[in-house]
Amino acid sequence: MAVLTPTKSTSPAPSPPGGGRRRGAARRTPPLVLAFVMVPLLAEALWVFWPALQGFYLALTDWDGVSPPTFVGLDNFREMAGDDTFRSATWHTVLWLVLFGGLSALLGLATALLFQQERRGIGFYRAALFLPVVFSLVATALVWQAIYQPDGVLNQVLEAVGLGSLRHAWLADQDTALYAVIVPALWRQIGYVMVLYLAGLKGIDPALYEAAKVDGASAWQRFRHVTLPQLRSVNAVVLSVIVIDSLRSFDVVWSLTRGGPYHSSELLSTYMYSTAFQSLRLGYGSALAVVIFVLAFGVICSYLVRAFREAD
Amino acid sequence: MTTTSAAVRRRRAATAGFHLGAGTLALLWLLPIGLVLVTSLRSFDDIAANGLGSWPHSFTLDNFRQAWVDGGQRRALINSLLVTIPAVLVTLALASMAAFALSRYELPFRRSLLLLMLGGNLLPPQILLVPVSKLSELMGLHDTLTALIGVQIGFGVGFYVFVLHGFMRAIPAEIQQAAVVDGAGPWQIFWRIILPLTRPALAALSALSFTWVFNDLLWAITVLRSDTKMPITAALIGLQGQYVSMWNVIAAGSVIAAAPTVAVFLRFQRHFVAGLNLGAVK
């Protein structure tokens, strides 16, 4: 911002007379500018758009990766209807979306509100919450796997505070595995969402709060009627980030449980991976990927559209 | 007099309460990191005798040697850097070029192109896994780091184009017009004017994309097969299988795997925050 202000003061003098001509010159696109767009676009086309189209086609085939794929129409999707693992993986994915997504948004906003004011020590607190964001999910998973072990810290702490009856093989129990996997994912995601919200809160004009205060608004009213509406665009970003991250979540589950025991922490993403690359049912795996895409599609689109409308 | 001193006292109590709460939260957040650091320094005998969750009794640095040399972490870290550094540099170069063209010139369909490029990045990677693995076989790149770099560039570029586009669009048109009057071509405008003004965003995005590419697991295990080519994330899972329940070595491996991104974060922390702030203000 500081860089941009001085140039503005020099512009008024030369701009009015020749403005039309110059704009006309810019409209003829120089070839170099076209190349600037085309090269990245081609890179993305090769590695993303073309494979994506193939992915949709492969969902309609039966393929072991060796002999050529055979077209089977919608058979893969019909098979899903009777596939219990698919049904539970879908349910877990929805649970994951609600728990992982919802809690990281709420707690991210809460911590951002707590740490929004510049004061002594605030840099340390923010850094502490943000630090896990830079760890890989694999490293995060292994850290928590040690904590969850039967002789690990979590069980020791439970014992020490007299809750020894709750001791558990957290990752080996079908009832707790999924939740035990969500916690490390949350530990890592909250700091990320917090930083997004901190940036959004910083962008709110302090004059709005002053005006609300003069009008006698309480802290809650200021939050409800100033902060939240002002955070609308950040909310859109956060929500799309969360939905997309939830549906993509793979590393943490894969490193901790591989989706087990007995598929009790299976997500669509892990089921898709093991179906395609371990059972080598590439067609059915692609069909599962299409389901993930369909789940993501509506949310991505609606937020893309909103983001673009706001951008203009 | 009494009312002001009461107000001062109340403010002090609020400050103390804030630091108590925030401090507890921060310590709770750092606790797992402290635990893995301690575990990585404990000896195997200590863990075997006293249990993983016990207070540590004896320390050794040998765990790091085991993970680094015997566990293959050294080669894996080199692989990770061989993928991450070129991928970040090329992605950001391509993305800033595209963002420049789309934000500073009235190209036909420029909004649709931007939407298309961002949309590609938002796709769930699962839909691409099978075709990308087959594509890399077809191009003779299967099980090579080149394939991994390629897919990281292709999949990542759309997002960076979008962010940089938002950033570059905020640069006033007068700057560019003045340069055009002075006879500058698109390359000079890009290289001498727009790119220097975009530096804060580029710094933030480099730090971000370094961590993203470095931490990736899914693409690596999709296009790579041999253990000797795996990056550090996949190698860490290998270590977990190789040293089952030797938590001292696994913890040392996790520390090694996390160290580079932590270093980048601590070094560029200001860029992270500054860039995100500038991006959010628009």
Image (cartoon, grey):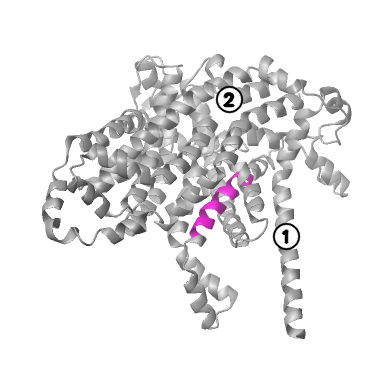
On the same chain, marks 1 and 2? The answer is yes
- Magenta region, main secondary structure: helix
Q: Is residue B282 magenta?
A: no
Counting from the top left corner in percent of width and height, residue A68 is at 35, 17
* Residue annotated with mark 1: B19
Q: Is residue B22 left or right of residue A164?
A: left
Q: Which residue type does callout 2 highlight?
A: Ile
* Residue annotated with mark 2: B232
Q: Is residue A195 magenta?
A: yes
Residue B235 position (above or below residue A28): above
Q: Chain letter for mark 2, please.
A: B
Image quadrant holding the C terminus of chain A, namely bottom left
Q: Is residue A157 left or right of residue A212?
A: right
Image quadrant holding the N terminus of chain A, namely bottom left
What is the crowding at mark 2: few (fewer than 14 residues within 10 Å), some, or many (at least 20)? many
What is the crowding at mark 1: few (fewer than 14 residues within 10 Å), some, or many (at least 20)? some
Dot 2 lies on which element?
helix
Counting from the top left corner in percent of width and height, residue A303 is at 39, 53
Q: Which residue type does callout 1 highlight?
A: His
Q: Which residues are magenta?
A: A186-200
Q: Disc 1 versus disc 2: distance between alpha carbons?
A: 37 Å
Look at the image and tell me whether residue B140 can be seen.
yes
Residue at 78% x, 42% y: name it.
A154
Residue B203 position (above or below residue B154): below
